[in-house]
Image (tube, rainbow, N blue to C red):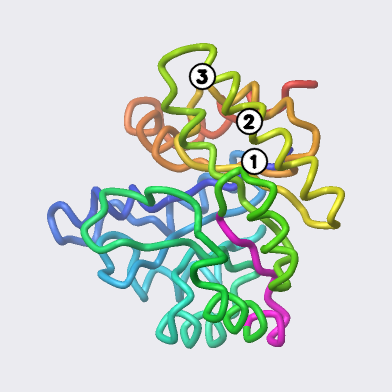
Amino acid sequence: MRLSVNVDHVATIRQARMTDEPDPVWAAAQAELAGASGITVHLRGDRRHIGDRDVEILRKTVAGVFNLEMKASDEMLDIATRIMPDMVTLVPEGEGELTTQGGLDIMAEEGAVRAGVERLRNKGIAVSIFIDPDVVQVGRAKAVGADIVELHTGIYADADDPDDAQCELEKVRVAGIAAAEMGLTAHGGHGLTYRNIQPIAAIGEIDEVSIGHSIIARAVLVGMDLAVREMLALVDVMG
């Protein structure tokens, strides 16, 4: 299983003082040197953390897969088709939300999502859609032309009751199997930590996980290199 490190929260720390450090570009380089297979950032409409400058430089410096999370808006599609990331992940984006609250409801926004997927794929950009672990949503992702689905693991990650966590884990597993059967690549992400990653990593149909906050929080204490290596050791459940 591959690990994509989301460096949004390095930018969050920077923006707390509206200065130029810490630099998410440097954090991304350290994450890759530690073994991450790619870097993920979410360019939000309000630019609350990652900014246009970050995306411009990351496109030039990321050695692995550069994944740009974004809303399927005209503004973001214009940026993506100019920057040309390796992959775009279409996500929902609510005004004032602390973080992404759930998967993109493709059926509710099918026209915009389908048009966005077509525009990106016509430029040769791989397209992922962040969805809840629901077989119906997997099917709609296939129907609109996505290459990848990123399964929302947040409900699993936040479950306090072990039985609830197991139920949510099974939903992720079933959705991953459905994606594979439909010819889609399955990724996982949201809320994953050093404590809860291994059951997700054991799902063979999930090829990659995207983890941000937990790694950055750990990196504040032990440094980016060790934080990434520790997560990689947990992701590599067969190692």
Q: Which mark is residue 229?
A: none
Q: Is residue 38 above or below residue 110?
A: above
**In this rendering, position of residue 138 left or right of residue 132:** right
Q: Which residue appears at 53% of the width and 87% of the height? A: 82
Q: Please tell me whether residue 148 belongs to the stretch shown in magenta.
A: no
Report the quarter where the C terminus lies: top right
CA neighbours of label 1 inside 10 A, class few (<14), some (14 to 19), many (20+): some
Marks 1 and 2, how far apart at CA:
8 Å
Which residue reaches farthest top? 162
- Residue 144, percent from left and from top: 69, 73
- Identify the amino acid type marked 3: Asp
- Identify the amino acid type marked 2: Leu
Secondary structure, mark 1, is: loop
Instruction: Identify the residue position indicated by label 3 in the image.
Output: 164
Instruction: Identify the residue position indicated by label 2 in the image.
Output: 232
Instruction: Identify the residue position indicated by label 1 in the image.
Output: 35
- Identify the amino acid type marked 1: Gly
CA neighbours of label 2 inside 10 A, class few (<14), some (14 to 19), many (20+): some
